Image (cartoon, grey):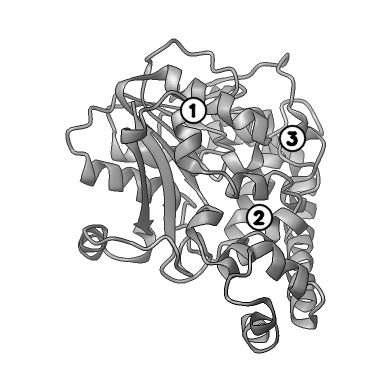
Amino acid sequence: MRRDYHAHVETALGKQASSRAIHAAMRKRDSFRFYSALRTTSQDLLYQTVQPGIERTASTINAQVREHARGKRIGSLSLDSTLAIPRSVSAIDIHLMPGSYHTEYEADDATMGLVYDQRLRISTFGLFGPDLGDIGRSISRYIAATMPDLSVRRVLDLGCTVGHNTLPWKETYPKASVFGIDVAAPCLRFAHARARSMGVALNFQQMNARELRFPDGSFDIVFSSMFLHEIPKKEIGVILREAYRVLRPGGLMLHMELPPDDQLSAWDSFYLDWDGHYNNEPFYRAFRAAKLPTLVAAAGFSSHNYLQAVVPSWNAMDETHWRQTIATTQLVDSDKTGRLTTGVRWFFFGARK
């Protein structure tokens, strides 16, 4: 598809072409149509592969989840049956996943959490590590290495789904109390059972990130991974202001996301925007078009305290090489940043309060 673009489209559009202009032109090309057909079909096949087996054994799976919940007390789980599921979750099957994250097929159901876990395990080709926690592990280790004086006693993960990237914060800061919140009860049930089965004390609560039920200044780090681009644009500012509120002075807000439109070439931005058009992620492109420093400043953070970085994958190399790599500047505009490819790198932005 890239070769077709360079050979037949780039010259006609000119060097200053926008990602939208590239999309409009490429939609007419067979290379793009074939590529898109492969991607949407592969998504469908993922769920055809994962879901039937889980559905057949749902009662057994849920019994095992309940057994973990009754076992030795490690961590906690708090669900809220009165919580309204946002329409950004309930009205669409995000990532084309039938049932989205929140659907329950029987009492105390955790199966959509397992569907998400298994779908991600297949679709990421091992790049997220054996426990699928590479994003949280890479970023938490980066913060520990580059901010050794930061005192971390409490960590909050927004939109944690099944806790893949929540758990590494406890691993990196073993003395900290680590919390994960999400609106989807099935994901949280699975997250709690998963963490207990691994012997890790994590605290999961069903909660909307728009209305955090935590006191002011109660966390040292507020983190999210691949979360904000699933949120309606008008709500992102509310969530960032809530993050600011619950951070202590000197605390750190971090959001791992795909890099923004204004920091990529037009081609790379077009490539990443595919999900916003064809993968049931309607808020994706609006988020990528946002000016991140402006969003952070509007939430209450000083513009001088804005930060962003590109972090190499912890899973991709040994620790010595990883530490050598973080000492050098990693380019945002790279075919490694946020891509499912060998040597993937993770982009995050945020601020210090």
Q: Residues within 10 Å of mark 3 (few under 14, many from 20)?
A: some
Q: Which SS class for mark 1?
A: helix
Left or right of 207 in this view: 246 = left
For the point 79% across and 61% down, the residue is: 44
Q: Amino acid at mark 2?
A: Arg
- Looking at the picture, tell me which residue is in the foreground, 336 or 141: 336
Q: Are marks 1 and 2 in contact (CB under 8 Å)?
A: no
- Looking at the picture, tell me which residue is in the foreground, 77 or 68: 77
Query: Which quadrant of the view contains residue 67?
Result: top right
Q: Which mark is residue 298?
A: 1
- Looking at the picture, tell me which residue is in the foreground, 126 or 2: 2
Q: Which SS class for mark 2?
A: helix
In three-dimensional space, the C-alpha distance between marks 1 and 3, rounded to whole angstroms, equals 23 Å
Q: Amino acid at mark 1?
A: Ala
Q: Please, is residue 140 above or below residue 344 in the view? A: above
Q: Which mark is residue 88?
A: 3
**Label 2 sits on residue:** 119
Nearest to viewer (mark 1 / mark 2): 1
